[in-house]
Image (cartoon, grey):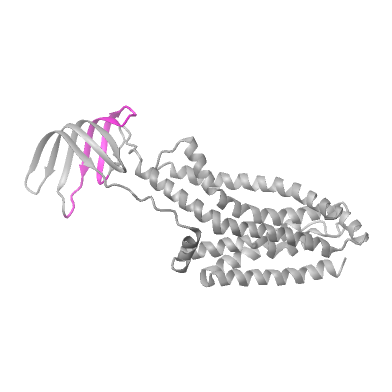
Amino acid sequence: MSRVNLYLLKHFSSLFASLFFTLFFITSIIFFIKIASITAVIKINFAELVLMYIYLLPNIIIYTLPITFFIALSISLFNLSKENETIVLFTLTYEPKKIVQLFVVVSSLLSLLLIINILVLIPMARQLNTNFLDYKKSEAKFNIKATEFGQKFSNWLVYIDKNDNQDNYGGVVMYQEKTSTNAEKIITAKNANIHNNSGAVKLELNNGKIFEILNQKIEQVNFKKLYLTTESSNRVNKVKNIISYWKEALKNKKRAYDLAFFLLIALFPVATVLFAISIGIVTYRYEKGGIYTSMITVIFAYLAPGIILIQYAGLLAVLIVFIASIIISYIYYRKKILLKY
Protein backbone atom coordinates (compact mmCIF):
# COMPACT_ATOMS: atom_id res chain seq x y z
CA MET A 1 0.00 0.00 0.00
CA SER A 2 1.37 3.44 -0.96
CA ARG A 3 2.20 6.14 1.53
CA VAL A 4 -0.58 8.31 0.12
CA ASN A 5 -3.14 5.57 0.79
CA LEU A 6 -1.81 5.16 4.31
CA TYR A 7 -2.04 8.90 4.84
CA LEU A 8 -5.63 9.01 3.58
CA LEU A 9 -6.61 6.05 5.75
CA LYS A 10 -4.97 7.60 8.81
CA HIS A 11 -6.78 10.90 8.26
CA PHE A 12 -10.08 9.10 7.67
CA SER A 13 -9.76 6.61 10.55
CA SER A 14 -9.11 9.28 13.19
CA LEU A 15 -12.26 11.16 12.23
CA PHE A 16 -14.19 7.90 11.81
CA ALA A 17 -13.28 6.79 15.35
CA SER A 18 -14.34 10.05 16.98
CA LEU A 19 -17.62 10.21 15.06
CA PHE A 20 -18.37 6.55 15.69
CA PHE A 21 -17.98 6.82 19.45
CA THR A 22 -20.13 9.96 19.48
CA LEU A 23 -22.96 8.34 17.53
CA PHE A 24 -22.49 5.10 19.45
CA PHE A 25 -22.89 6.98 22.74
CA ILE A 26 -26.03 8.80 21.57
CA THR A 27 -27.60 5.59 20.23
CA SER A 28 -26.69 3.74 23.42
CA ILE A 29 -28.57 6.34 25.48
CA ILE A 30 -31.67 5.75 23.34
CA PHE A 31 -31.42 1.99 23.86
CA PHE A 32 -30.78 2.45 27.59
CA ILE A 33 -34.06 4.39 27.80
CA LYS A 34 -35.71 1.40 26.12
CA ILE A 35 -34.15 -0.92 28.69
CA ALA A 36 -35.28 1.38 31.51
CA SER A 37 -38.89 1.01 30.37
CA ILE A 38 -38.55 -2.77 30.80
CA THR A 39 -37.54 -2.36 34.45
CA ALA A 40 -41.08 -1.15 35.14
CA VAL A 41 -42.20 -4.74 34.50
CA ILE A 42 -39.32 -6.79 35.89
CA LYS A 43 -36.61 -6.28 38.50
CA ILE A 44 -33.02 -6.44 37.26
CA ASN A 45 -29.70 -5.70 38.92
CA PHE A 46 -26.75 -3.84 37.40
CA ALA A 47 -25.09 -6.99 36.00
CA GLU A 48 -28.34 -7.97 34.27
CA LEU A 49 -28.67 -4.42 32.91
CA VAL A 50 -25.20 -4.72 31.37
CA LEU A 51 -26.14 -8.14 29.94
CA MET A 52 -29.24 -6.69 28.28
CA TYR A 53 -27.11 -3.87 26.84
CA ILE A 54 -24.66 -6.43 25.39
CA TYR A 55 -27.58 -8.19 23.69
CA LEU A 56 -28.48 -4.89 22.03
CA LEU A 57 -24.96 -4.13 20.76
CA PRO A 58 -25.44 -5.77 17.31
CA ASN A 59 -28.47 -3.53 16.75
CA ILE A 60 -26.59 -0.42 17.88
CA ILE A 61 -23.71 -1.23 15.52
CA ILE A 62 -25.94 -1.68 12.47
CA TYR A 63 -27.44 1.78 13.04
CA THR A 64 -24.18 3.64 13.74
CA LEU A 65 -21.41 2.18 11.54
CA PRO A 66 -22.83 2.85 8.03
CA ILE A 67 -23.80 6.48 8.74
CA THR A 68 -20.48 7.08 10.52
CA PHE A 69 -18.51 5.78 7.52
CA PHE A 70 -20.34 8.03 5.07
CA ILE A 71 -20.05 11.18 7.20
CA ALA A 72 -16.40 10.54 8.19
CA LEU A 73 -15.32 9.94 4.57
CA SER A 74 -17.11 13.05 3.32
CA ILE A 75 -15.73 15.33 6.03
CA SER A 76 -12.17 13.90 5.98
CA LEU A 77 -11.87 14.50 2.22
CA PHE A 78 -13.47 17.92 2.62
CA ASN A 79 -10.87 18.84 5.26
CA LEU A 80 -8.09 17.73 2.91
CA SER A 81 -9.63 19.86 0.15
CA LYS A 82 -9.84 22.79 2.55
CA GLU A 83 -6.07 22.59 3.06
CA ASN A 84 -5.59 22.12 -0.74
CA GLU A 85 -4.03 18.71 -0.11
CA THR A 86 -6.26 16.93 -2.61
CA ILE A 87 -5.19 19.40 -5.32
CA VAL A 88 -1.56 18.66 -4.50
CA LEU A 89 -2.20 14.92 -4.71
CA PHE A 90 -3.86 15.25 -8.12
CA THR A 91 -1.01 17.43 -9.32
CA LEU A 92 1.44 14.70 -8.29
CA THR A 93 -0.46 12.23 -10.53
CA TYR A 94 -2.42 10.62 -7.69
CA GLU A 95 -5.72 10.32 -9.56
CA PRO A 96 -9.23 10.43 -8.03
CA LYS A 97 -9.66 6.84 -9.29
CA LYS A 98 -7.10 5.69 -6.72
CA ILE A 99 -9.10 7.30 -3.90
CA VAL A 100 -12.20 5.55 -5.22
CA GLN A 101 -10.42 2.19 -5.42
CA LEU A 102 -9.13 2.54 -1.85
CA PHE A 103 -12.43 3.43 -0.25
CA VAL A 104 -14.52 1.05 -2.35
CA VAL A 105 -12.46 -1.73 -0.80
CA VAL A 106 -12.90 -0.27 2.70
CA SER A 107 -16.65 0.22 2.23
CA SER A 108 -17.05 -3.30 0.84
CA LEU A 109 -15.27 -4.81 3.84
CA LEU A 110 -17.45 -2.74 6.17
CA SER A 111 -20.66 -3.83 4.42
CA LEU A 112 -19.50 -7.47 4.57
CA LEU A 113 -18.94 -7.20 8.32
CA LEU A 114 -22.37 -5.60 8.72
CA ILE A 115 -24.04 -8.40 6.74
CA ILE A 116 -22.33 -10.98 8.97
CA ASN A 117 -23.58 -9.01 11.96
CA ILE A 118 -27.12 -9.12 10.55
CA LEU A 119 -27.18 -12.76 9.58
CA VAL A 120 -25.33 -14.17 12.59
CA LEU A 121 -25.09 -11.86 15.60
CA ILE A 122 -28.48 -10.12 15.53
CA PRO A 123 -30.54 -13.38 15.46
CA MET A 124 -28.55 -14.84 18.35
CA ALA A 125 -28.65 -11.63 20.39
CA ARG A 126 -32.39 -11.12 19.84
CA GLN A 127 -33.27 -14.65 20.86
CA LEU A 128 -31.06 -14.51 23.95
CA ASN A 129 -32.56 -11.15 24.91
CA THR A 130 -36.13 -12.43 24.47
CA ASN A 131 -35.42 -15.56 26.48
CA PHE A 132 -33.73 -13.54 29.19
CA LEU A 133 -36.80 -11.29 29.53
CA ASP A 134 -39.14 -14.31 29.59
CA TYR A 135 -36.98 -15.95 32.24
CA LYS A 136 -36.97 -12.82 34.39
CA LYS A 137 -40.74 -12.53 34.06
CA SER A 138 -41.20 -16.16 35.07
CA GLU A 139 -38.92 -15.66 38.08
CA ALA A 140 -40.31 -12.28 39.03
CA LYS A 141 -41.62 -11.43 42.48
CA PHE A 142 -44.77 -9.37 42.28
CA ASN A 143 -43.90 -5.84 43.27
CA ILE A 144 -46.95 -5.05 45.42
CA LYS A 145 -46.49 -1.80 47.35
CA ALA A 146 -48.20 -0.71 50.54
CA THR A 147 -51.10 1.78 50.55
CA GLU A 148 -51.37 1.91 46.76
CA PHE A 149 -54.57 1.20 44.83
CA GLY A 150 -54.98 -0.51 41.47
CA GLN A 151 -52.36 -3.24 41.96
CA LYS A 152 -53.09 -6.73 40.66
CA PHE A 153 -52.25 -10.34 41.45
CA SER A 154 -53.49 -12.52 38.59
CA ASN A 155 -57.12 -11.35 38.11
CA TRP A 156 -57.42 -9.95 41.67
CA LEU A 157 -57.15 -6.31 42.65
CA VAL A 158 -54.94 -6.04 45.74
CA TYR A 159 -54.54 -3.50 48.52
CA ILE A 160 -52.17 -3.90 51.49
CA ASP A 161 -51.49 -1.83 54.60
CA LYS A 162 -47.79 -2.61 54.96
CA ASN A 163 -44.91 -4.78 53.76
CA ASP A 164 -41.34 -5.42 54.92
CA ASN A 165 -39.65 -5.59 51.47
CA GLN A 166 -39.23 -9.35 51.92
CA ASP A 167 -42.46 -10.39 50.19
CA ASN A 168 -44.31 -10.38 53.54
CA TYR A 169 -47.49 -8.31 53.63
CA GLY A 170 -49.92 -7.20 56.33
CA GLY A 171 -53.55 -6.06 56.17
CA VAL A 172 -54.42 -7.60 52.81
CA VAL A 173 -57.67 -6.90 50.92
CA MET A 174 -58.34 -8.55 47.55
CA TYR A 175 -61.24 -8.03 45.16
CA GLN A 176 -62.38 -10.06 42.14
CA GLU A 177 -65.16 -8.64 40.01
CA LYS A 178 -68.06 -10.70 38.79
CA THR A 179 -67.62 -12.66 35.56
CA SER A 180 -69.76 -15.08 33.59
CA THR A 181 -68.25 -18.01 35.51
CA ASN A 182 -67.32 -16.50 38.91
CA ALA A 183 -69.23 -14.56 41.51
CA GLU A 184 -67.99 -11.27 42.92
CA LYS A 185 -65.55 -11.96 45.76
CA ILE A 186 -63.67 -10.13 48.48
CA ILE A 187 -60.83 -11.63 50.52
CA THR A 188 -59.34 -10.13 53.66
CA ALA A 189 -56.30 -11.49 55.53
CA LYS A 190 -54.11 -10.38 58.41
CA ASN A 191 -50.91 -11.20 56.53
CA ALA A 192 -49.63 -12.83 53.36
CA ASN A 193 -46.45 -14.13 51.75
CA ILE A 194 -45.42 -14.59 48.13
CA HIS A 195 -43.49 -17.65 46.90
CA ASN A 196 -42.15 -18.45 43.43
CA ASN A 197 -42.03 -22.08 42.35
CA SER A 198 -40.55 -22.53 38.85
CA GLY A 199 -42.43 -19.58 37.44
CA ALA A 200 -45.71 -20.28 39.27
CA VAL A 201 -46.18 -17.46 41.76
CA LYS A 202 -48.10 -18.50 44.88
CA LEU A 203 -49.72 -16.09 47.33
CA GLU A 204 -50.13 -17.54 50.84
CA LEU A 205 -52.86 -15.79 52.87
CA ASN A 206 -53.13 -16.31 56.63
CA ASN A 207 -56.05 -15.80 59.08
CA GLY A 208 -58.64 -14.26 56.84
CA LYS A 209 -62.13 -14.34 55.39
CA ILE A 210 -63.70 -14.86 51.98
CA PHE A 211 -66.89 -13.02 51.07
CA GLU A 212 -68.77 -14.29 48.00
CA ILE A 213 -71.44 -11.86 46.87
CA LEU A 214 -74.38 -13.65 45.21
CA ASN A 215 -77.63 -12.20 43.88
CA GLN A 216 -79.62 -12.35 47.11
CA LYS A 217 -77.00 -13.08 49.77
CA ILE A 218 -73.38 -12.85 50.89
CA GLU A 219 -71.58 -16.01 51.90
CA GLN A 220 -68.64 -15.88 54.31
CA VAL A 221 -65.87 -18.45 54.78
CA ASN A 222 -63.16 -18.16 57.41
CA PHE A 223 -59.73 -19.66 56.79
CA LYS A 224 -56.39 -20.06 58.49
CA LYS A 225 -54.45 -20.55 55.27
CA LEU A 226 -55.43 -19.92 51.66
CA TYR A 227 -53.25 -20.30 48.59
CA LEU A 228 -53.76 -18.45 45.32
CA THR A 229 -51.50 -19.48 42.44
CA THR A 230 -50.79 -17.97 39.04
CA GLU A 231 -50.14 -20.14 36.03
CA SER A 232 -46.56 -21.25 35.49
CA SER A 233 -44.74 -19.12 32.96
CA ASN A 234 -42.38 -21.46 31.15
CA ARG A 235 -42.03 -19.54 27.93
CA VAL A 236 -38.24 -19.62 27.61
CA ASN A 237 -37.75 -20.92 24.09
CA LYS A 238 -34.93 -22.89 22.56
CA VAL A 239 -32.46 -20.71 20.64
CA LYS A 240 -32.81 -21.43 16.92
CA ASN A 241 -29.89 -21.57 14.51
CA ILE A 242 -29.49 -18.59 12.19
CA ILE A 243 -30.87 -20.44 9.16
CA SER A 244 -34.08 -21.36 10.97
CA TYR A 245 -34.38 -17.84 12.36
CA TRP A 246 -34.20 -16.07 8.99
CA LYS A 247 -36.14 -18.83 7.24
CA GLU A 248 -39.18 -17.57 9.13
CA ALA A 249 -38.96 -14.44 6.98
CA LEU A 250 -40.71 -16.47 4.28
CA LYS A 251 -43.92 -16.50 6.32
CA ASN A 252 -43.39 -13.81 8.96
CA LYS A 253 -43.85 -10.28 7.56
CA LYS A 254 -42.12 -8.61 10.51
CA ARG A 255 -39.08 -10.88 10.17
CA ALA A 256 -38.99 -10.28 6.40
CA TYR A 257 -39.14 -6.52 6.90
CA ASP A 258 -36.35 -6.60 9.49
CA LEU A 259 -34.08 -8.60 7.17
CA ALA A 260 -34.67 -6.27 4.22
CA PHE A 261 -34.30 -3.11 6.33
CA PHE A 262 -31.05 -4.27 7.93
CA LEU A 263 -29.60 -5.27 4.55
CA LEU A 264 -30.55 -1.86 3.16
CA ILE A 265 -28.54 -0.19 5.93
CA ALA A 266 -25.63 -2.67 5.63
CA LEU A 267 -25.22 -1.86 1.91
CA PHE A 268 -25.28 1.89 2.57
CA PRO A 269 -21.45 2.30 2.71
CA VAL A 270 -20.93 0.66 -0.72
CA ALA A 271 -23.96 2.35 -2.29
CA THR A 272 -22.89 5.85 -1.22
CA VAL A 273 -19.10 5.74 -1.27
CA LEU A 274 -18.95 7.66 -4.58
CA PHE A 275 -21.36 10.24 -3.18
CA ALA A 276 -19.10 10.72 -0.14
CA ILE A 277 -16.01 11.17 -2.34
CA SER A 278 -17.82 13.57 -4.66
CA ILE A 279 -19.13 15.63 -1.74
CA GLY A 280 -15.77 15.71 0.05
CA ILE A 281 -13.47 16.58 -2.85
CA VAL A 282 -14.06 20.24 -3.65
CA THR A 283 -12.28 23.37 -4.81
CA TYR A 284 -12.58 25.06 -1.45
CA ARG A 285 -12.44 28.62 -2.76
CA TYR A 286 -15.61 28.09 -4.79
CA GLU A 287 -17.37 25.31 -2.88
CA LYS A 288 -17.06 26.23 0.80
CA GLY A 289 -20.57 25.44 1.96
CA GLY A 290 -23.20 22.84 1.36
CA ILE A 291 -21.39 19.72 2.55
CA TYR A 292 -23.74 19.07 5.47
CA THR A 293 -26.83 19.71 3.35
CA SER A 294 -25.47 17.33 0.73
CA MET A 295 -24.77 14.59 3.30
CA ILE A 296 -28.26 14.85 4.79
CA THR A 297 -29.79 14.80 1.31
CA VAL A 298 -27.93 11.62 0.33
CA ILE A 299 -28.83 9.84 3.58
CA PHE A 300 -32.49 10.79 3.26
CA ALA A 301 -32.65 10.03 -0.50
CA TYR A 302 -31.26 6.53 0.13
CA LEU A 303 -33.17 5.51 3.25
CA ALA A 304 -36.59 7.10 2.71
CA PRO A 305 -37.44 5.42 -0.63
CA GLY A 306 -35.88 2.18 0.60
CA ILE A 307 -37.98 2.03 3.75
CA ILE A 308 -41.15 2.78 1.77
CA LEU A 309 -40.43 0.26 -1.01
CA ILE A 310 -39.46 -2.52 1.40
CA GLN A 311 -43.05 -2.60 2.67
CA TYR A 312 -44.22 -3.60 -0.81
CA ALA A 313 -41.30 -5.38 -2.48
CA GLY A 314 -39.16 -6.71 0.39
CA LEU A 315 -35.64 -7.79 -0.61
CA LEU A 316 -36.29 -6.76 -4.21
CA ALA A 317 -36.62 -3.17 -3.00
CA VAL A 318 -33.16 -3.37 -1.43
CA LEU A 319 -31.68 -4.49 -4.75
CA ILE A 320 -33.49 -1.71 -6.64
CA VAL A 321 -32.38 1.04 -4.25
CA PHE A 322 -28.82 -0.30 -4.12
CA ILE A 323 -28.39 -0.46 -7.92
CA ALA A 324 -30.06 2.93 -8.40
CA SER A 325 -27.71 4.48 -5.83
CA ILE A 326 -24.64 3.00 -7.53
CA ILE A 327 -25.72 4.32 -10.95
CA ILE A 328 -26.71 7.80 -9.75
CA SER A 329 -23.59 8.16 -7.57
CA TYR A 330 -21.33 7.20 -10.50
CA ILE A 331 -23.03 9.78 -12.76
CA TYR A 332 -22.59 12.41 -10.04
CA TYR A 333 -18.96 11.38 -9.42
CA ARG A 334 -18.14 11.46 -13.14
CA LYS A 335 -19.67 14.89 -13.62
CA LYS A 336 -18.25 16.49 -10.47
CA ILE A 337 -14.85 14.80 -10.10
CA LEU A 338 -13.62 12.89 -13.16
CA LEU A 339 -14.41 15.61 -15.71
CA LYS A 340 -12.84 18.26 -13.46
CA TYR A 341 -9.76 16.58 -12.03
**Percent x, y of residue 235:** 35, 51
Location of residue 202 by image quarter: top left
Front residue of this view, candidates 81 and 5: 5
Residue 73 position by quadrant: bottom right
Count the numbered circles shown. 0
* Whole-percent x, y for residue 214 in the image: 10, 47
Residue 297 appears in the picture as rendered: no
Q: Quadrant of the N terminus?
A: bottom right
Left or right: residue 311 versus residue 216 is: right
Against 10, residue 330 (above or below) is below
Q: Compare residues 198 and 142 and report the one nearer the observer.
A: 198
Q: Split into 4 quadrants, where in the image is the C terminus?
A: bottom right
Q: Quadrant of residue 116?
A: bottom right
Residue 173 forms part of the magenta stretch: yes
> What's the magenta region?
154-180
Say whether residue 179 is magenta.
yes
The image position of residue 325, as x and y in percent, is 68, 69
**What secondary structure is the magenta-colored segment mainly?**
strand
Viewer can see residue 96: yes
Residue at 65% x, 60% y is 111
Residue 17 position (above or below residue 180) = above
Q: Position of residue 55 (x, y in %)?
A: 52, 47
